[in-house]
Amino acid sequence: MPFNSMQFPVQRLSRVLAGLGATALVLLGGCASRPEFTAVSQPGLIERLTPYKVDIQQGNVVTREQLAQVKPGMPREQVRDLLGSPMLTDVFHAQRWDFIYVSARRSGGVGEASRLAVTVHFDKDGRVEKLDAPALPTENEFVAGMVDRRAATPKVPVLELTPEQRARLPLPVRSESATLPQPQGPARSYPPLEPR
């Protein structure tokens, strides 16, 4: 059998690398079993970083002003124009529309969920018979509730002088040269834009 000069160094190198890998595993395994290395410490910067989580809003928002416009005897088309398409329509309860709104605020790792459900019941002719609704927010209350209260309010700069600052301002000085110059050149007359 002929001797291959490249076979010997490759085999030797692979044995050396395998031995080094096994030694590293033994050393690292021994470190992990020691109690001073496995003690629980305070979370570091990496553990405190969390991914951004989107606020989830689903459904139709029905406010107090919108619901006040829905009157008994109103047809389905007018209800749809006022409140939008219902979130749930059921084949087994064809005379009922459910308008559900769910909001889950997930920013900052805190999950705040709110749910509003309005049910409109219709009679056999498709006219509003009754409404089931909790205490709904007004439009202004709803918009104010969408603002993240944990965010710092920006400082608004004051752009107006106080009366004391106005009193300290120097008065403007009028001079003879401050008068506006009179236009020079021939006076021109233009025809009227509309017929008289």
Image (cartoon, helix red, strand yellow):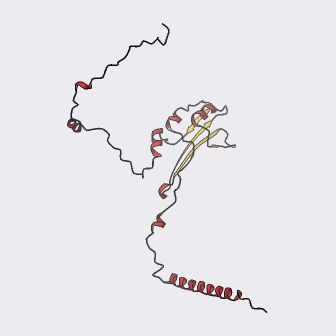
Placement of 31 over or under 195, stated as above or below = below
Please indicate whether residue 63 sits to the left or right of residue 80 in the image: left
Residue 19 falls in image quadrant = bottom right
Please indicate whether residue 151 sits to the left or right of residue 88 in the image: left
What x and y, as percent, mark residue 43?
45, 69
What x and y, as percent, mark residue 89?
65, 42
Placement of 159 over or under 7, stated as above or below = above
Q: Given the current orientation, which residue lies at the most extreme front position?
A: 185
Residue at horizontal 51 percent and vertical 43 percent from the top: 134
19 or 180: which is nearer to us? 180
Please indicate whether residue 29 sits to the left or right of residue 147 in the image: right
The number of discs equals 0
Q: Given the current orientation, which residue lies at the most extreme right position?
A: 1
What x and y, as percent, mark residue 44?
45, 68
Placement of 70 over or under 21, stated as above or below = above
182 or 185: which is nearer to us? 185
Placement of 76 over or under 100, stated as above or below = above
Residue 8 falls in image quadrant = bottom right
Residue at horizontal 45 percent and vertical 13 percent from the top: 190
Residue at horizontal 63 percent and vertical 85 percent from the top: 18
Q: Given the current orientation, which residue lies at the most extreme top position?
A: 196
168 or 24: which is nearer to us? 168
Image quadrant occupied by the N terminus: bottom right
Residue 27 falls in image quadrant = bottom right
Please indicate whether residue 156 sits to the left or right of residue 53 in the image: left
